[in-house]
Amino acid sequence: MTGFLLFIILMGWLISRYFQSPVVLYFAVGFSFLTSIGSYWFSDKIVLAMTKSQPIKEEDNRELYHIVENLCIASGLPMPKIYIMPEAQPNAFATGRNEEKAVVVVTAGLLQKLNKSELEGVIAHELSHIKNKDMLLQTVVVIMAGVIVILSDFILRASRYGAFRGSDDRDSRASAIFAALALIAAILAPIAATLIQLAISRKREFLADASGALLTRYPEGLAMALEKISSDISPMRRASNSTAHLFISSPFKGKQAVSFFTKIFSTHPPLQERVTALRGLKI
């Protein structure tokens, strides 16, 4: 979060210093804030529509309903809406803007392939995301990343149309230095913002694992669930980059790699690291 703020301040300072006006920065921040808040407000409806998830009631799946209900009582959370995603791949995610509007989604494959203790571990993980306010945090992160991308795009477009070529009254060495710094920041900042965003997402997965294990008092249940999920090769028909970070495990089966370069651009930490961390917990 500090890194994001420093990037925004640096890029805003470069733009205002070169153009001698902070108006562009104010506009970029306001525009990104409004669009991101709008997405946050309707995020649950958008994601549910994208994944074709369908709501269920208690009579549709009593075991699942009672697992969610019991864990909500234990964690002090209100009962979320429960949806099932028609996919053979075992997976799950939570969405919604707050605890009162939360939604827990599980795939049909998850219900078919996991036993009760494993299913409890997965549900506890998703409820932990809700309890830890990860949806709110991710929205703030998206806003900050959006500001950086908009500022970067503005600088690159301005350079394309000659805004950095200078004029008679500003054609100086200092002006050229600020122009060069602004262009370098415009190219590198979105990459850095993406890495920070992904790093935060990975940290929240570790935290949700630990919080979920504390809730069930049985880390092995979630550890075994993650092993089953990682070994399952069923593809997800509706997997997309825009929703991949929501799932308990990346829905892109067969596309994971173990290289350092791939890890830093991943929305999830390696499953084996998560399993090792869970089995190392002392509860």
Image (tube, rainbow, N blue to C red):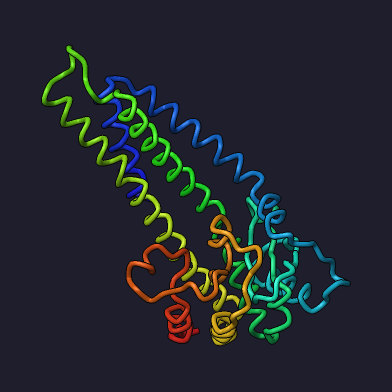
Residue 88 sits above or below residue 41 on the image: below
Q: Position of residue 189 (x, y in %)?
A: 32, 45
Q: Residue at x 68, y 77 (%)?
A: 110
Q: Residue at x 68, y 55 (%)?
A: 50
Residue that sits furthest to the left in the current view: 173
90 left or right of 145 in image: right
Q: How many marks?
A: 0
Q: Position of residue 206 (x, y in %)?
A: 46, 71
Please identify the quarter of the rendering in which residue 165 is found. top left
Please identify the quarter of the rendering in which residue 180 is found. top left
186 left or right of 126 in image: left
Residue 116 sits above or below residue 204 on the image: below
Q: Residue at x 60, y 43 (%)?
A: 39
Q: Residue at x 16, y 31 (%)?
A: 177
The front one of 176 and 208 is 176
Residue that sits furthest to the top in the current view: 169
Q: Position of residue 30 (x, y in %)?
A: 48, 30
Residue that sits furthest to the right in the current view: 59
Residue 131 sits above or below residue 181 on the image: below
